[in-house]
Image (cartoon, helix red, strand yellow):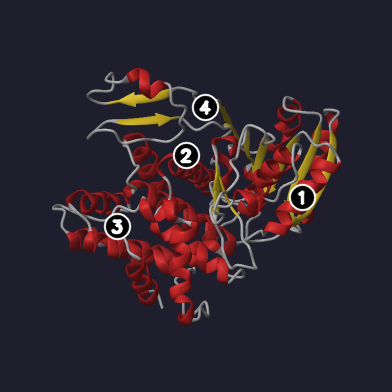
Amino acid sequence: MNFEYLLPRTELMSGKGVLENIEDRVSKSSHKLQMEKKMTFRYLFPRTNLIFGEGALESLGKETRKLGKSVLLVTGRKSMQRLGFLDKARKYLEQEGLKVFHYGKVEPNPTVDIVDEGAKLALQNQCEVIVGMGGGSAMDSAKVIAVVAGHSKSSPCSIWDFSVTQDEPLSITEATLPVIAVTSTSGTGSHVTRYAVISNPETCEKPGFGSEYMYPRVSIVDLNIAKNMSPELTARTGFDTLAHVLEAFVSREGNPIVDSYCLKAIELVFSYLPAAYREGDNMEARFNMALADTYAGWAIAVASAALPHAMAHPISGHYPNVDHGVALAAISSNVMEFNIDNGDKKTVHKYCEIAKTMGQSIRECTKEKAKKSIQAVKELLEKVGLRVNLSQLKIDQNKISNMAQGAFKTMRRGVEKNPVPATEEDVEQIYRRSF
């Protein structure tokens, strides 16, 4: 049940004509997949080494020592402390002779101020490595704390200076400090991606930040931590995993390698999320949900999440108390319907593949058959107590226009990678149907 995986560092080019202009292609350092011709793609394997299984946290000290001598350990306010994993992490780090400074102020939907304060603490203590331990909020915060702390050595800055909302955002460079991610949930994928999402309460914006320099150097997935998730957290993060692969599978940047991750993750979520939700100590279910989360992270690291994530983040930007996974649960099925109704033959076929992987019987692929995937998602949400709409989340319909604008302003990449082009009017209509 335990393993380590040293990820390949080889960029893969596949398809007819890849030798054409090869000199030009290899001269461009890019971690992104680029569809160049039909059935031709580029794929640079994710860059995070993975340590996975029960007791994996014990490797934290040795892995961190390879990167530096002083550590900022970033967590949320309660769970890692209450469950004793903060003390264990500190012990493993100190056993390797490392200086450890704890920053435990991260909250759900972390803000600019939380990040900048953490970076200031890292600078004051000359930290060389940032360790994020917890859910997506802690790991995202660790990544962007590493950005701010690394770049502030030459000139003081804020994480907001790197935001896509700025007219001329700063570039994220190799000055970023190295990060190790210790995930406590099975849902965000943050432990293996180059992304982080941060909120600005003053502007009600929640943009994404992304760079190859933000990949964690090492990811630790300890099932002894994951088994402590509550049923509600299991459901919310589990659906985030599913949303990642539902979006990446139909993304405009998808490819056969990403597709294999996505289909396997869909299969695992439908097979094991209900069991993990009902039986928190079911280690087979925890193992497979953690594996699905990792597959999903690898998928979006290349193919990107699409329209549902682009729409969910503005909801949390305006309503910080709305959990990301819950926001996704409220809107994802309506985005799927939009894509199937307006998609081309390839898009419809992809949703038929999704439906089959979810256990639906399909002999001939049509739009109506493809919609079996939507019904399967709704049934899964019902099983894990997550069947919600925006009315139940007390979202004000007067905010729809602002949220739609926010999707295009702060998450344009997600909008553009959706298989069906969407306008602001389309997004507004999807929000309305989600009430």
Front-most of 396 and 295? 396
Badge 2 density bin: few <14, some 14–19, many ≥20, Cα 10 Å:
many
State if disc 3 and disc 4 touch (CB < 8 Å): no
Task: Specify which label sits upstream in the sequence, 1 or 3.
Answer: 1
Mark 1: which amino acid? Gly
Q: Which residue is mark 1?
A: 118
Whether residue 407 sits left or right of residue 151 in the image: it is left
> In the rendered image, which quarter is residue 130 located in?
top right
Q: Which residue is mark 2?
A: 298
Q: Which residue is mark 3?
A: 421
Q: Quadrant of the N terminus?
A: top right
Q: Which residue is mark 4?
A: 7
Q: Position of residue 399 (x, y in %)?
A: 49, 77
Residue at disc 2, secondary structure: helix
State if disc 1 and disc 4 touch (CB < 8 Å): no
Mark 4 to mark 3: distance in Å? 34 Å
The numbered dot on residue 409 is none
> In the rendered image, which quarter is residue 206 located in?
bottom right
Badge 1 density bin: few <14, some 14–19, many ≥20, Cα 10 Å:
many
Whether residue 237 sits left or right of residue 222 in the image: it is left
Asked if residue 83 can be seen in this view, the reply is no
Please count the marks in the image: 4
Front-most of 382 and 104? 104
Task: Specify which label sits upstream in the sequence, 2 or 4.
Answer: 4
Residue at horizontal 50 percent and vertical 58 percent from the top = 410
Task: Specify which label sits upstream in the sequence, 4 or 3.
Answer: 4
